[in-house]
């Protein structure tokens, strides 16, 4: 699976949009971009995934660049409960062995 | 979404004893489950892939005789840490794929089990 690069930490004000970037310049054509988050002392939680089109669900939006070498996870209205480590993972859809990097610690401030 | 449950959520044991952690898929059948370990302030590390009805596949560097995995049914996988030592103290997390999610379905994770070996 392709390697990803994320900033180690970010801050966001409560109520504002949180934009979390991820670089995956070596992504191959059959690899998907997945986002998970882990709130302290809990198991990871699936957020969203996509191949090349932008995706939106009740939790977040995923924007993938046209060349697919980077993506951005958008939490439209961050709350204090969104404080967590966010992991960007790329993988072939049929491979369920996830390789977690260090992720981005998002801290939402009041 | 699909639910994966782990038990116990935390356990304290004496050095040299064995500890069993259960991972259950509550509303779907999982032919494959995954076990991860996470040390403080570090990321998750995949330990092994648990396959229903067959032997688990272990990642390089993970001792299969120390971390026994049994996946006897489509909804239950167990991880037994044998002869636990303080260095085995960690947060153990399982995950399972919901097959109804299709070919690119997401993985669902348990709440994690925190093991402390004294």
Image (cartoon, rainbow, N blue to C red):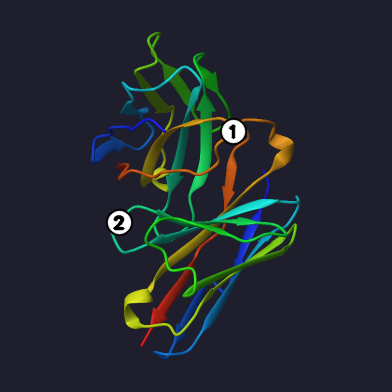
Quadrant of the frame with the C terminus of chain A: top left
What residue is pinned by disc 1?
A: A94
In the depicted structure, whether residue B37 falls above or below residue B32: below
Task: Please tell me the numbered disc located at residue A18.
Answer: none
Q: Confirm whether residue B118 shows in the render.
A: yes
Measured Cα–Cα span from mark 2 to mark 1: 26 Å
A38 vs B48, nearest the viewer: B48
Residue B76's quadrant in the figure?
bottom right
Quadrant of the frame with the N terminus of chain A: top left
In the rendered image, residue A64, in percent from the top left (x then y), is placed at 42, 17
Badge 1: chain ID: A
Residue B34's quadrant in the figure?
bottom right
Left or right: where does residue A59 sit relative to residue A71? Answer: right
In the rendered image, residue B42, in percent from the top left (x then y), is placed at 30, 56
Q: Confirm whether residue A107 shows in the render.
A: no
Q: Secondary structure at mark 1?
A: loop
Task: Please tell me the numbered disc located at residue B42.
Answer: 2
- Residue at horizontal 59 percent and vertical 33 percent from the top: A94
Label 2 packing within 10 angstroms: few (<14), some (14-19), many (20+): few
Left or right: where does residue A99 sit relative to residue B68? Answer: left
- Residue at horizontal 33 percent and vertical 64 percent from the top: B39
Badge 2: chain ID: B
The residue mark sitting in front, 2 or 1, is: 1
In the rendered image, residue B32, in percent from the top left (x then y), is placed at 65, 51
* In the image, farthest residue toward the top: A66
- Residue at horizontal 39 percent and vertical 54 percent from the top: B44
């Amino acid at each position: 699976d392709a390697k990803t690069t994320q900033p180690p930490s970010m801050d966001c004000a409560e109520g504002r949009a949180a934009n979390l970037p991820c670089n995956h310049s070596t992504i191959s054509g059959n690899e998907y971009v997945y986002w998970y988050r882990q709130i302290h002392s809990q198991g990871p939680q699936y957020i969203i995934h996509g191949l090349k089109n932008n995706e939106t669900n009740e939790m977040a939006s995923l924007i993938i660049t046209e060349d697919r070498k980077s993506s951005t996870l958008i939490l439209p209205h961050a709350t204090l409960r969104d404080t967590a480590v966010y992991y960007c993972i790329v993988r072939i859809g049929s491979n369920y062995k996830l390789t977690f990097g260090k992720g981005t610690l998002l801290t939402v401030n009041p | 979404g699909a639910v994966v449950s782990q038990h116990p959520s935390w356990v304290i044991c004496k050095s040299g004893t064995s500890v069993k952690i259960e991972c259950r898929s509550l509303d779907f059948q999982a032919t494959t489950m995954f076990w991860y370990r996470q040390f403080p302030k570090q990321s998750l590390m995949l330990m092994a892939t648990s396959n229903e009805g067959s032997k688990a596949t272990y990642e390089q560097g993970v001792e299969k005789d120390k971390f026994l995995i049994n996946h006897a049914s489509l909804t239950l996988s167990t991880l037994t840490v044998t002869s636990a030592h303080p260095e085995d103290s960690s947060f153990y997390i399982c995950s399972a794929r919901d097959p109804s999610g299709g070919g690119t379905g997401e993985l669902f994770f348990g709440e994690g089990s925190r093991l402390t070996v004294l």
